[in-house]
Amino acid sequence: MLNALRTRLLDRLKFLKIPELDVSGDSITEFESLYEQYVSSGNGELIPYDLPDPKYIFLNYLIENKNIVVHGSNNPNINIFEPRDQTLFNGKKVTAVFAASDSIWSMFFAVINRSQYEGSLRNACLTADTKKGVKRYYYFSLNKDYHGKRWTNGMIYLFDKDGFQQGGAKNEWISEKEVKPIAKIPVEPSDFIFKDSIKLHDEATSHVKNMMRDLTRKR
């Protein structure tokens, strides 16, 4: 009942969203083959992805079925992730490695051109469990006054979830110890399906105020 109410509430707001996974038998066979060849060994191998399914579907399949969490970065050559001073989604300060149980959320951070972008990256990722699986909701916003190059190629790193604990939100995970990725997959701006649906915000206005305005604004 609570999950149904949560889903109805989230559906009424103007979140970006994707439905529960609906993967064909052939796709599952291909996903499992890639997992066995490049991920299960835990050696940090590069996954040569050339399947017709979007990369976010493959990654969410691993997240939901293989005890995987992911991290997005512009840097394609990270061998060891070390804890850094960062802020959880709920505002708490921690020294940790961050990961997420959602591929699209991580992909946002992988393809934003972090070396040039100026301003805050405002974002949210919420999920609701349904009879069909996990329904996923998003909010992304960039500084309206930044007019430089927004996007770049990046990398999604895969971690064993057992090395992490939940952070300040349901889909946020942290490790207070250094972590080695078990595999990685390159991504491009075109892999981020909400690239053309990003909101723009005024840096002087709070994240919460901007988000509620965008989520409740009449069409």
Image (spheres, rainbow, N blue to C red):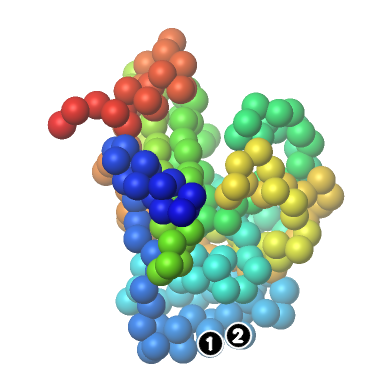
Quadrant position of residue 13:
top left
Of residues 43 and 95, the one nearer the viewer is 95
Left or right: where does residue 97 sit relative to residue 62? right
The number of discs equals 2
Which numbered tag is attached to residue 96? none
Task: Name above or below for residue 80 compared with residue 84.
Answer: below
Q: Amino acid at mark 1?
A: Ser
Report helix, strand or loop for mark 2. helix
Pointer 1 residue: 33
Cα–Cα gap, marks 2 and 1: 6 Å
Q: Amino acid at mark 2?
A: Gln
Residue at 48% across, 46% down? 126
Residue at 46% across, 30% down? 122
Of residues 89 and 129, the one nearer the viewer is 129
Residue at 46% across, 54% down? 1
Residue at 63% across, 31% down? 90
Visible in this render: residue 2? yes
Visible in this render: residue 76? no
Left or right: where does residue 184 sit relative to residue 7? right
Which numbered tag is attached to residue 37? 2
Q: Residue 3 at x, y = what percent?
A: 47, 53
Report helix, strand or loop for mark 1. helix
Q: Residue 193 at x, y = what percent?
A: 33, 54
Quadrant position of residue 219:
top left
Quadrant position of residue 160:
bottom right
Instruction: Tell me if label 2 and label 1 are in contact, CB under 8 Å.
Output: yes
At label 1, counting other C-alpha atoms closer than 10 Å, the crowd grade (few under 14, some 14-19, many 20 or more) is few
Outermost residue to the right: 177
Q: Residue 168 at x, y = what percent?
A: 65, 38
Outermost residue to the top: 204
Q: Residue 43 at x, y = what percent?
A: 72, 74
